[in-house]
Amino acid sequence: MNTFCLPWIGYILLINALCIKRSGRSLLTEAPARFMLIWPASALFWWFFEYLNRYVQNWYYVGVDNFTPLQYALHASLAFATVLPAVLSTQRYLLTYGTFNIGLKSLTPLTFMAEKRTATIILPLSGISLMLIGRYPDFLYPLIWGAPLLVITSLQALRNESTIFSGPSIGDWRAVIASAVAALICGFIWELWNYHSLAHWEYAVPYVDRFHVFQMPLLGYGGYLPFGLECLLVGQMVLGNRFIGMPGKENIAP
């Protein structure tokens, strides 16, 4: 944990450099001020999941006993600050490829996702499920990766704001799929670099704690896919639609 942020800073710089090589642009060069805001937002973002993990206890940290609470908070925050820059930069890099850009721009639309009545149904269901996680953690723990996302996007939809599902509602799946894949790529690297670290995390995931790839159970990697959408949601709020490959609100039918 002492140096976990350093390789990720190198990765973030590298992936932005690759974006510039392929397209002439990157998040770091195109929106530098907003990109800097992503770092503190990222730390707060992951601390929120650390809070949720208090209820489900799906992961825990080993080798951190020598840290004081202040040292732990500082080192952890530095590591957490790299999460969103890494995922969003990787998503931007994937969008430089036709497979993730043109190939995903005109797919089957999910028109019901643009309807207010959908948000009206999803909001109470996701809110209740989030509250019940602490009561039934062994059964509802997967919802920590989806329920907060659905709560916020439902509120956005009810306020007539664009959401990360506005693209799929018109058949534009670029941002959503690229973000899910970007989180899976970063997740694999997280687990790889965590595996032999002196201070590292381990997992205790009910029912699926087998067939490990590094510390993570194989099925656990599926959690990175909705996590990518969580990252996209925060990226939308901090960076804006056009920087993360989402259609603007003027392109979305009411």
Image (cartoon, rainbow, N blue to C red):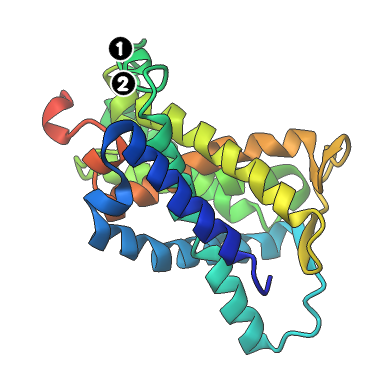
Q: Amino acid at mark 1?
A: Ser
| Residue 145 disc label | none
Can see residue 254? no
Q: Distance between the Cα atoms at labels 1 and 2?
A: 6 Å
| Residue under numbered circle 1 | 106
At 62% from the left and 88% from the top, the residue drawn is 70
Q: Residues within 10 Å of mark 2 (few under 14, many from 20)?
A: many
In the visual, does 141 lie left or right of 85? right
Can see residue 134? yes
In the visual, does 219 lie left or right of 149? right
| Residue 172 disc label | 2
Where residue 216 sits, quadrant-wise, is top right
* Image vertical order of residue 164 relative to residue 31, above or below: above
Per the image, label 2 sits on a secondary structure element best described as loop
At 87% from the left and 34% from the top, the residue drawn is 211
At 64% from the left and 65% from the top, the residue drawn is 4
- x, y percentage for residue 30? 23, 49
Q: Nearer the viewer, residue 41 or 115?
A: 41
